[in-house]
């Protein structure tokens, strides 16, 4: 009973308003001043709406020396898998092939195809299979990886992958319209990528 | 006892015969019943007040239930909205935020709710959309609307019918997910020509505060133009492009992906704000109903006691008249 009371006292005295991890106070920046000016001319009685940049933490500027770690944000529509994780290297499946990103990488916008994403931190390697997306590498060694779906490799069933591959190959050979062909081709691509990710 | 009952029965019919304004007696609350007393009629019908109390109590129950439903829906959707917040940040980090961009074809995407009783959030969105429309329609520029949601459609078709390109309703009938929103975004991108898309929605900050927000998505040509002109997107050129054959192809895919990501977040945030606003509206409504019920109870008791007193005085004066 005393432990509970002490715990309650402690939390009450040290609780501050918990901010969400992905945003800061809304008046972090005053927003686009030209927009606010134009707004005031047209609708002086209504407050101008907020813009996304006011809800975002500003990114740090480019450091003068090479940073030792890469800061990775790996986001999906339904979750933020990694948020500002400090890692050594990431390998992303760009459409031109597997691309490794180390700290100090030149700023890049890379389109991703379905494939294996691996995050290397010391001796830890986390592997995900991602559907397509984009990867941005900024000059301050921040990397944003956006994907629509991502699954850790151990949750994939190899038997299902084989079945899907043979199914879609069959559909491709029997496809008649362009749309059907494109859909079947996509299925084949994804399943063969899954296959090579599981075996490779 | 029987005579008192009979007398009370008589009183209930007398107001209808004698009062000059019979309709008002049923509709409005208390003043007419007192007028009837002045006309020489002894009865004050407590039935009217009792009916009103019953209906107000029902309203209180219904609004309290609606508040609980909205609270539970809010809990479910708030988690998803918070998780989707990381999705639009990389785009803003890369391309910056340019709501003041000056382009020829603007499309304003207004996100509103399908159901009502959610406070003022839909009117706020519509007001902001109209102001954006005014800012962006000049001699060389034009702006059109794409409306999501019944309430926005109802308000905007009233005066801007010609400027509406596309209307979509009943988004929340099925569970909101990324696939559905990306199909929607695809629809919009295919059917509407745009240089800049301005998405207007209510961002959910807390259960009592919803901030109207506008997010801007530029078409790839405008992105190229702005990056050459310098300014916020100026260092886009310094980025190497991997994948795709040409830079413009990658930028096209990027713009489409950005639109669907920003839309997904916007739709979830607006749904959250809708539930939060409905919660607070229903809460204040049930509180008002409770206050009204208190006032009516007092009036009911007063009229009841007054009628008992009148009865008593009649009996006593009658009795004393007989004796004396």
Image (tube, coloured by chain):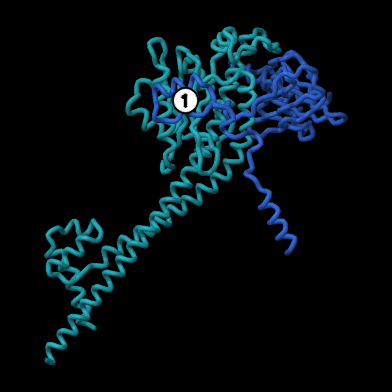
Chain colours: A blue, B cyan
Query: Which percent across, then down, holds residue A19?
Result: 63, 39
Residue A188 appears in view: no
Quadrant in which the C terminus of chain B appears = bottom left
- Could you say which quadrant of the image residue A107 lies in? top right
Quadrant in which the N terminus of chain B appears = bottom left
Residue A108 located left or right of residue A34:
right
- Could you say which quadrant of the image residue A2 lies in? bottom right
Helix or strand or loop: what does disc 1 sit on? strand
Query: Which percent across, then down, holds residue B7?
Result: 18, 77
Report the chain holding disc 1.
B
Viewer-proximal residue among B172 and B317: B317
Q: Which residue is mark 1?
A: B109
Q: Is residue A115 above or below residue B204?
A: above
Residue A118 located left or right of residue B272:
right
Residue B206 located left or right of residue A117:
left
Q: Is residue B236 above or below residue B178?
A: above
Classify mark 1: residues with Cα within 10 Å, few (<14), some (14-19) or many (20+). many
Q: Is residue B313 above or below residue B217?
A: below
């Amino acid at each position: 009973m005393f432990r509970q009371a002490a715990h309650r006292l402690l939390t009450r005295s040290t609780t501050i308003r918990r901010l969400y991890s992905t945003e800061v106070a809304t008046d972090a920046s005053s927003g686009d001043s030209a927009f606010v000016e134009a707004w005031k001319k047209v609708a002086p009685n209504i407050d101008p709406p907020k813009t996304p940049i006011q809800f975002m933490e500003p990114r740090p500027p480019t450091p003068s020396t090479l940073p030792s770690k890469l800061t990775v944000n790996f986001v999906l529509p339904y979750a933020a898998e990694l948020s500002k994780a400090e890692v050594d290297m990431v390998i992303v499946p760009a459409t031109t092939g597997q691309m490794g990103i180390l700290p100090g990488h030149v700023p890049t916008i890379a389109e991703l195809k379905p494939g294996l994403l691996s995050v290397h931190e010391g001796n830890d390697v986390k592997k995900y299979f991602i559907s397509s997306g984009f990867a941005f590498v900024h000059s301050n060694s921040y990397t944003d990886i956006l994907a629509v779906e991502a699954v850790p490799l151990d949750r994939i069933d190899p038997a299902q992958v084989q079945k899907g591959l043979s199914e879609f190959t069959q559909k491709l050979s029997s496809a008649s319209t362009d749309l059907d062909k494109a859909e079947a081709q996509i299925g084949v691509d994804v399943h063969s990528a899954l296959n090579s990710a599981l075996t490779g | 006892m029987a005579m008192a009952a009979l007398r009370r029965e008589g009183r209930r019919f007398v107001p209808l015969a004698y009062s000059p304004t019979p309709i008002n007696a049923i509709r409005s609350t208390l003043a007419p019943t007192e007028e009837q007393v002045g006309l020489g009629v002894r009865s004050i019908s407590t039935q009217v007040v009792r009916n009103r109390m019953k209906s107000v109590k029902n309203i209180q129950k219904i609004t309290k239930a609606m508040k609980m439903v909205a609270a539970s829906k809010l809990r479910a959707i708030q988690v998803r909205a918070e998780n989707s917040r990381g999705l639009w940040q990389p785009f803003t980090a890369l391309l910056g935020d340019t709501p003041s961009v000056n382009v020829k074809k603007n499309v304003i995407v207004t996100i509103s709710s399908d159901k009502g009783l959610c406070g003022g959030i839909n009117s706020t969105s519509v007001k902001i959309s109209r102001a954006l429309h005014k800012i962006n329609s000049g001699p060389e520029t034009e702006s059109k609307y794409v409306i999501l949601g019944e309430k926005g459609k109802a308000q905007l078709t009233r005066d801007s019918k010609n400027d509406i390109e596309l209307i979509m309703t009943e988004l929340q009938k099925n569970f909101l997910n990324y696939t559905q929103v990306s199909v929607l975004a695809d629809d919009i991108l295919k059917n509407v020509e745009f240089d800049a898309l301005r998405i207007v929605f209510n961002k959910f900050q807390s259960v009592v505060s919803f901030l109207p927000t506008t997010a801007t998505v530029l078409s790839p040509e405008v992105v190229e133009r702005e990056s050459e002109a310098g300014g916020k997107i100026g260092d886009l050129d310094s980025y190497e492009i991997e994948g795709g054959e040409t830079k413009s192809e990658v930028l096209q895919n990027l713009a489409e992906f950005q639109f669907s990501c920003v839309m997904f977040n916007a739709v979830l945030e607006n749904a959250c704000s809708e539930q939060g606003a409905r919660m607070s509206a229903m809460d204040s409504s049930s509180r008002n109903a409770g206050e009204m019920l208190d006032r009516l109870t007092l009036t009911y008791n007063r009229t009841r006691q007054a009628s008992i007193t009148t009865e008593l005085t009649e009996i006593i004066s009658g009795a004393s008249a007989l004796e004396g």
